[in-house]
Image: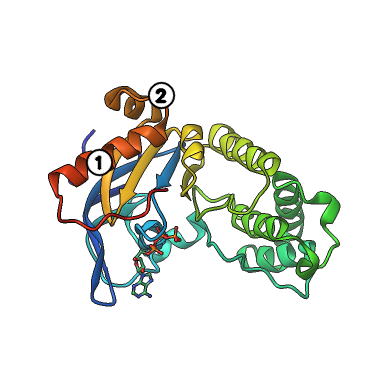
Amino acid sequence: MMNKSGGVAGDAIVASGLSVVRGDRPVLRDLDFTVPRGRITGLLGPSGCGKTTLMRAVVGTQAKVTGTLHVLGHPAGHPALRPRIGYVTQAPSVYDDLTVRQNLDYFAAVLLPGRAHRTDRRTAVDRALTDVDLTTHADALAGRLSGGQRSRVSLAVALLGAPELLVLDEPTVGLDPVLRRDLWDLFHHIAADRGTTLLVSSHVMDEAERCHRLLLLREGELLADDTPEALRHRNDTTTVEDAFLHLVDAAAARDPHRTEEPRP
Ligand SMILES: Nc1ncnc2c1ncn2[C@@H]1O[C@H](COP(=O)(O)OP(=O)(O)OP(=O)(O)O)[C@@H](O)[C@H]1O
C-alpha cells in the first residue's frame, strides 16, 4: 500500500524531497528514495558526496534537514526511534581504558538497566561478542586493539539492543579482505535471520554487489535507487561500478557545467 510519501507500508525509510544544507552549502538535494525492511541497502558514492550527511539525517542528528523523512513509521529524530536504531559512525566510539566486555557491559547497562535485566544483559553481551567474532578478545583493553577490531567493538555495541534498523557508516574501511567478507556475511545473517534493516555506506564499489538494493549518490544527488542486477541490466554493464560510471557520464552530459568529482 502506498503512503503519502510514495513509500509502501513495509519500508523502513521513506524520503521525499529530502534536502540538507551544511554551512551555507546544499549537501543533499531533493532526494526521493525508500529503504525496504529486512534488506541490506548500500549507500554508495565518492568521498564527500553526502553519505554521512544522509545517515545523520536518518538517525536524527543532522541539522537543517528539509523535506519528508520517515523512519520506522516516525519522523526522523523522533524520541521513540532511539532504542530501535543502531548507528555506527566512522570513528569507533569505544572506551580505550575498558576491556571489550566492559565496554559492552557499560552500554548494555544503559540499554537494560537494573538488577532484573542482569541475565538479559549477559545474554546480549555474549551474543554481540559472538556476532562480531571478538569472544577471544573479550578481556583485551579496547585501546590495545587494531583499528578493525575497534570498529567491530562499535558494531557490537550497536547490536546490543537488537535494533530494527542498523545504520553503518563505512564499516569495512581499513579491514582486510577476509574480515570484510566475514562482516558482509554477518550483515546478511542479521538481515535474513533477525529481519533487521541495514543501511550501509561504502565508497568501494565491489561492496555494492553484496547489497540487495543500492542508493547511488553523487554530489548530493541520487543517481539511482535500484537493485544491483537492475542497475547492471539497465546500463548494459557487467559490474555496478561500470553502471555507476555510466550514470555519472550521462549526468555530466546532461549538465556539462557541473564540476566533476574524483571517481570512486
Ligand atoms: N560540518 C560541516 N560544515 C560544512 N560542510 C560540511 C560539514 N561536514 C561535511 N561537510 C560537507 O558536506 C559534504 C558531504 O559530506 P559527507 O561527510 O556527508 O560526505 P561522505 O560522502 O560521507 O564522505 P566520506 O566518504 O569522505 O565520508 C562534503 O562536501 C563536506 O565537505
Q: Is residue 192 left or right of residue 58?
A: right
Mark 2, Cα crowd under 10 Å, few <14 / some 14-19 / many 20+, is few
- Badge 1 element: helix
User: Given the image, on which type of amino acid does mark 2 rest?
Assistant: Thr
Instruction: Look at 32% across and 49% down and name the residue there.
Output: 217
Which numbered disc covers residue 249?
1
- Viewer-side residue, 14 vs 238: 238
Tags 1 and 2 touching, CB below 8 Å: no
Marks 1 and 2 sit apart, C-alpha to C-alpha, by 17 Å
- Amino acid, disc 1: Asp
Asked whether 223 or 55 is in front, the reply is 223
Q: Position of residue 105 (x, y in %)?
A: 74, 64
Q: How is the image coloured?
A: rainbow
Residue 19, given in percent of the width and then of the height, sits at 23, 61
In-front residue for pair 38/224: 224
Tag 2 residue: 238
Q: Residue at x 51, y 39 (%)?
A: 207
Q: Residue at x 72, y 56 (%)?
A: 149
Q: Position of residue 251 (x, y in %)?
A: 20, 44
